[in-house]
Amino acid sequence: MDFSVVFDNLDLLIPAAGLSILLTLIVILISTVFAFPLGILRQTKGFVAWLIAGFSWTMRASPTLVLLYFVFYGLPQIGILVPAVAVAIIGLSVQAVGYALEVVRGGVMAVDPRQKDATKALGIPTVTAWRKILLPQALVAIIPPFFSNSILILQATTIASVITVRELTGESNNLIGLTYRAIPVLIFSAIIYLVLASILTGLQALSERRWAIPGVNTYPKPSRSWLGELRMDSDAEVSAGPSSGENTR
């Protein structure tokens, strides 16, 4: 297989990969900034919580491509002209917020409600309680789905090519159309996305280790002797079952 088409066009593919990375980072940043306050407010009661729930439902139920088309063709209809890259950032960020706020809400729900009651009983200010007590505990549950959502954002940037954004997938399609040598170009693109997703997975592992709570979610590895004792206890219970039943009768 001849990869010369890739090496001869690295001056196009590398900047396109950089644009994909930039889109991913911007969307992750925007969605994170909005997700935390909205996810916390989603836990409250009242009209605001209902509005946030409706927004989350709408964003998660809408296909990404439809949202991009809606922004791309809708904004010019009201006299707002923005570059295609900005349209991609707006469309992807709006949908990502809908997913991310639910991730935050799930993490907040994982915190024992008695923790909140304790902070109120001790007279700890609300902001301080969330910053130093509640959110650090919620992060344990937030981190895994947050990074999974980040990988989905990376993958969603490939759709931006349909609105003329020349990120990695769009540039790869253009190159395939010019050279008709699809496999080498697609393999290169797949490797880039695999490396980027692997970096996010590694950051997830580091974050989980950094925010881990001692004694929580740590399970000892079972040894052979422990498994043998467990099996013997199980066999003993099974064998003792009928006899104990007869004694009862």
Image: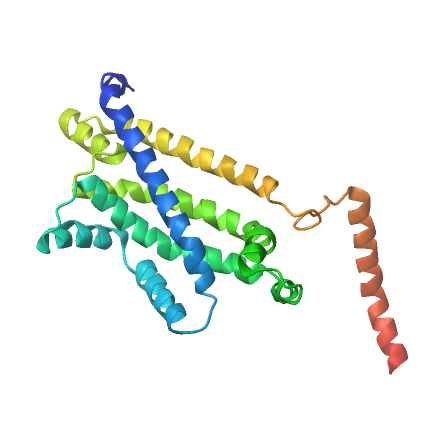
The structure residue drawn at horizontal position 71% and vertical position 49%, both measured from the top left corner, is 215
The structure residue drawn at horizontal position 44% and vertical position 63%, both measured from the top left corner, is 41
The structure residue drawn at horizontal position 58% and vertical position 57%, both measured from the top left corner, is 129
In the foreground, 146 or 135: 135
Quarter of the figure with the N terminus: top left
The structure residue drawn at horizontal position 31% and vertical position 59%, both measured from the top left corner, is 59
Colour scheme: rainbow
Please identify the quarter of the rendering in which residue 109 is found.
Answer: bottom right
Q: x and y percent of residue 148 in the render?
A: 45, 46
Q: Is residue 227 left or right of residue 69?
A: right
Q: Is residue 11 left or right of residue 73?
A: right
Q: x and y percent of residue 107 in the render?
A: 53, 57
In the foreground, 96 or 196: 96
In the foreground, 178 or 73: 73
- Evaluate whether residue 167 shows in this view: yes
Q: x and y percent of residue 195 in the render?
A: 41, 30
Residue 44 drawn above or below residue 90: below
Q: x and y percent of residue 5 in the render?
A: 23, 19
Number of marks in picture: 0
Residue 203 drawn above or below residue 106: above
Please identify the quarter of the rendering in which residue 83 is found.
Answer: top left
Q: Is residue 86 left or right of residue 35?
A: left
Q: Which residue is outermost to the right? A: 247
Quarter of the figure with the C terminus: bottom right
- Evaluate whether residue 2 shows in this view: no
Please identify the quarter of the rendering in which residue 78 is found.
Answer: bottom left
In the foreground, 149 or 124: 124
Residue 189 drawn above or below residue 123: above
Q: Is residue 109 left or right of residue 247?
A: left
Residue 78 drawn above or below residue 18: below
